[in-house]
Image (cartoon, grey):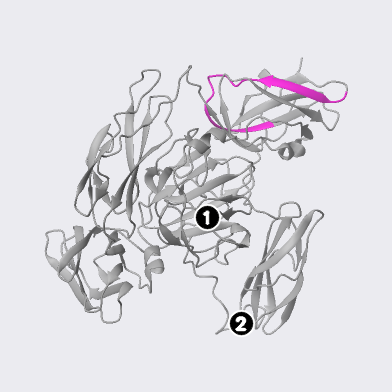
Amino acid sequence: MVLLAGGVAVLLPGCGAGPIGSGGAGPVDSDTNNNDNIAPPASNENDNTNGAGSGYTLTVSVVGQGSTSPPPGSEFYAAGQRVTLSAIPPTDWQFVSWSGDLADSSSTTSILMDQDRWVTATFQPLDESDLPCFHLPWAAGVTRTIGQDNNGQFTHQGRFAWDISMSIGTVIAAVAPGRVIRVEDSYPDNPGGFPDDPDTPSNAVWIDHGGGFQAVYAHLTPGGARVSAGQLVAAGQCIGLSGNSGYSSGPHLHYEVLDVTGQSTPSGFIEVVGNDGVAQEGDVLTSQNELDVDATAGFVESSLPTDSFDMNGIELYEPTPPAFFYTTGVDYNMSGRVTGTDEYVCVSLVDQDTGTTVYCRESLVHTDANGEFDIDFAFPESLSGRFFMGVISGVGGVSGTAPIAILLSPAPSGNTPPTAAVVSPADNSIDFGESGALNGSASFDADGDVLSYAWTPVSGPPVAIADPRAASTTFTLEVGEGVTRVAFQLVVFDGWDYSLPALVEYEMADAFAVSVLGLSQTECADVDTCQMFDTRSVALSGGRLFFWVELLNVSDGDTSSVEILDAVGAVVLQGEQMHDESAGSTFLRIGWTFSGPIGQPGTWSVVYRRNGVAEATLSFSAF
């Protein structure tokens, strides 16, 4: 009789880019300081006494596989000392460049320690000089600026990740077709600044985009997820709304591509010309991420990584089952070889919360004389949710680690996913303040199940949808972002599966006057930094308040004015500015300093006027 070991040791996947402190498994972030404006560690420019005397700290990190001299980590050096840096690639890898405080493609170079320094050595496989490229993670036609880029000295050291400033509630778009692996959206947004605890959990969506690549979209607003685990999504589909959750300095999106085991991996963007598609800090990019439902037909899920089970003395053969998503009751097969002398093998599932084995005996097999095995397995319908999965072995029993986080989902019985379909308007032109129709009555379900509806605006200025859960509804257009189209996506649900989205568009006849606007209690110099501190919650106990706006089509002699009204409608703050040298596009900031409480707390509003005509409004909470 073969006895199972009493539990399987749990090995968490390698650090990737997810919200730290989430308590879940899968690609868990060991460092979610995913923000744009984090001050680096205090330098010693004014006080060169750092315990051991006058000097500075050199911090070295590595992207890819390779070693450095000095090794990765932080070391203290005397002020004025020149430190030699060497990058040593292993077999089948090549050194690419140094980045951070040193831009150099020489494998051996040096750096002067005249302040605290941060450098990153990047290596890439010899046979993978071309990086995988995806679309930008926001709506087509919208232009945004890259904040912190990969290997950023603040919080992206050793990671290929990007931060993009976005106001809370901005649409996040899937960069490619894929299947949703995991969703977190119950954590609150920060009221402003960093939370005290660096382990503050973030809302995020993880998607398997195939080819062994998954992407994480982090810092979403609470309740902002627009997809569910296991759902198939199209390129350009709205998957969530940006926010300021987790350890974040201000509203933004953290986007990162990971390999199957959750390790940060190099990637690029289709919209970036040159540089292998790698966007850099300060790049101003316009998304071409159009909704592409047809591309999902060719989507192939990532396969289980064969090298993840080496630690258990298991060699898996190709092809392998899916890396992330499994369905109960479906037959899967896994074959391979035990590299040692173990006689028994099983596919094991470990409960992520308790660490106990919940599935193994059912798939237990005896190896043949060559140590080979062939396992047919199907997870029972009694199991669903997230688990760790591994292939483990032994002589009189089995034990080992379960290194891969998977999602196990119940299978709908013969269900056919529904189809979302919209009826295009007879006239799709629209202007500010006008209303339009959204008609999803052509949507259908082949099984005759009752449908529920979800309309989401994905491009254009703010809109008020009368009933976003109705099959057909109306919307009213407000003044907002400077784009020329208004687009909506419709997704329907039949109680079992979600449809792929359908798109309907309206065209703006005139260019917008107001691009973006917001409030900040932190002084900011331009629209990008202001967006990082954009807030909807203001303290009235004292301090500073700034209204900011980016304007389009401004002419010399135009007058901009702003009024801030308290909860009872009284004008509390106001300002005005004449534009005499800012024809075209311009950034405007008006600030006030006050001490002590002002106005009545509650929901306040901002009215922006140009030449006396109200062109934009904004509401926020004042306390």
Q: In this view, does 213 lie to the left or right of 545?
A: right
Q: In this view, does 409 lie to the left or right of 501?
A: right
Looking at the picture, how far across and down is residue 135, in whole percent? 52, 51
Q: In this view, does 416 lie above or below 33?
A: above
Q: How many labels does the image show?
A: 2
Q: In this view, does 458 lie above or below 286?
A: above
Q: Is residue 308 left or right of residue 461?
A: right
Q: What residue type is labelled 2?
A: Thr
Q: Indicate the secondary structure of the residue bearing disc 2.
A: loop
Q: In this view, does 12 lie above or below 82?
A: above
Q: Which amino acid does label 1 sit on?
A: Thr
| Residue 201 appears in the rendering | no
Q: Does the magenta stretch include residue 382?
A: yes
* Residue at numbered disc 2: 49
- Which of the 4 image quadrants contains residue 161? bottom right
Looking at the picture, how far across and down is residue 381, in whole percent? 53, 19
Neighbourhood count class around disc 2 (C-alpha, 10 Å): few under 14, some 14–19, many 20 upward:
few
Looking at the picture, how far across and down is residue 177, in whole percent? 52, 40
Q: Is residue 496 magenta?
A: no
| Residue 475 appears in the rendering | yes
Extreme front residue here? 426
Please provide the residue range marked out in magenta. Answer: 370-390
Q: For the N terminus, which image quadrant?
A: top right
- Which of the 4 image quadrants contains residue 558? bottom left
Q: Which mark is residue 32?
A: 1
Dots 2 and 1: beta carbons under 8 Å?
Answer: no
Q: In this view, does 84 lie above or below 189?
A: below
Q: Which of 86 and 457 is in front in this view?
A: 457
